[in-house]
Image (cartoon, grey):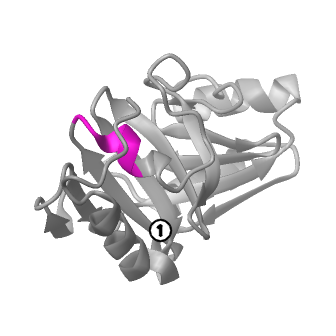
């Protein structure tokens, strides 16, 4: 990963990633044929609700967010999905419309818990879990990459605000000590 902005002054490292290639796919994910085709095209199963598997995240009953692997392009994946899925499908490159952040450190759960209405306790939110929610007033999605590392996605127009919010929320001696 390459970063455009990093702040390590707080209780966790907050890093804004450079452009991340990603695609949103809208399709009938309950259709067995569509799921089988997507499994073949994406190299793994369609994730269960509120999960992320192999960089494919469940966003809604009819929507996936796909982080494109390094060395591949979102445009190529869009073309592959639109041509490969025979049912009605919409695949769109959203790389320029999203900002991606990493939060790394033992207190990453507490930083997110300050603004997200999600139970982030270790027993309730583990690796592979994915939530689409709000952080403060900003629409976000996040997942646990490793036990002490979260990835977060928001609209690119909120990038600067979100970075500042995360840095502020991560200030030392400001964490509630829940986890």
Q: In the drawing, does residue 106 fall left or right of residue 23?
A: left
Q: Nearer the viewer, residue 25 or 158?
A: 158
How many numbered discs?
1
* Quarter of image, res 7: bottom left
Q: Which residue is mark 1?
A: 95
- Percent of width and height locating residue 85: 75, 42
Q: Residue at x 71, y 30 (%)?
A: 49
Query: Horizontally, is 20 left or right of 83 in the view?
Result: left
Within the image, what quadrant is residue 6 found in? bottom left
Judge by depth and name the residue closer to the eye, 13 or 58: 13
The stretch drawn in magenta includes residue 80: no
Query: In the image, what residue occupies the spot 27% across and 68% down?
Result: 18
In the depicted structure, whether residue 49 falls above or below residue 63: above
State the residue lying farthest toward the top: 123
Residue 68 seen in render = no
The answer to whether residue 68 is above or below residue 144 is below
Q: Per the image, is 109 magenta?
A: yes
* Residue count near mark 1 (Cα–Cα under 10 Å), binned few <14, some 14–19, many ≥20: many
Is residue 4 left or right of 45 when viewed as pictured?
A: left
- Residue 31 is situated, as x and y percent measured from the top left of the image, at 88, 29
Q: Quadrant of residue 38?
A: top right
**Farthest left residue?**
9
Q: Is residue 130 above or below residue 122?
A: below
Residues shaded magenta: 106-111
- Give the quarter of the figure containing the C terminus: top left
Residue at image coords 77%, 52% = 26
Depth order, front residue of 139/11: 11
Residue 157 position in % (x across, y down): 50, 83
In the displayed structure image, the side of residue 164 where residue 47 appears, left or right: right
State the SS at label 1: helix
């Amino acid at each position: 990963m390459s970063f455009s902005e990093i702040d390590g002054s707080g209780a966790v490292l907050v890093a804004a990633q450079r452009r991340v290639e990603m695609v949103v796919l809208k399709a009938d994910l309950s259709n067995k044929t569509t799921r089988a085709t997507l499994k073949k095209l994406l190299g793994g199963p369609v994730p269960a609700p509120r999960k992320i598997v192999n960089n494919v995240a469940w966003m809604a009953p009819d929507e996936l967010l796909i982080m494109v692997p390094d060395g591949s392009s979102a445009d190529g994946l869009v073309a592959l999905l639109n041509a490969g899925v025979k049912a009605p499908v919409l695949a769109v490159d959203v790389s320029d419309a999203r900002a991606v952040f990493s939060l790394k450190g033992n207190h990453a759960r507490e930083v997110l818990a300050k603004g997200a209405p999600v139970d982030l306790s270790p027993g309730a939110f583990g690796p592979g879990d994915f939530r689409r929610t709000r952080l403060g007033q900003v629409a976000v999605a996040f997942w646990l990459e490793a036990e002490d590392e979260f990835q977060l996605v928001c609209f690119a127009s909120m990038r600067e605000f979100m970075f500042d919010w995360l840095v502020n929320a991560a200030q030392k001696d400001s964490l509630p000590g829940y986890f």
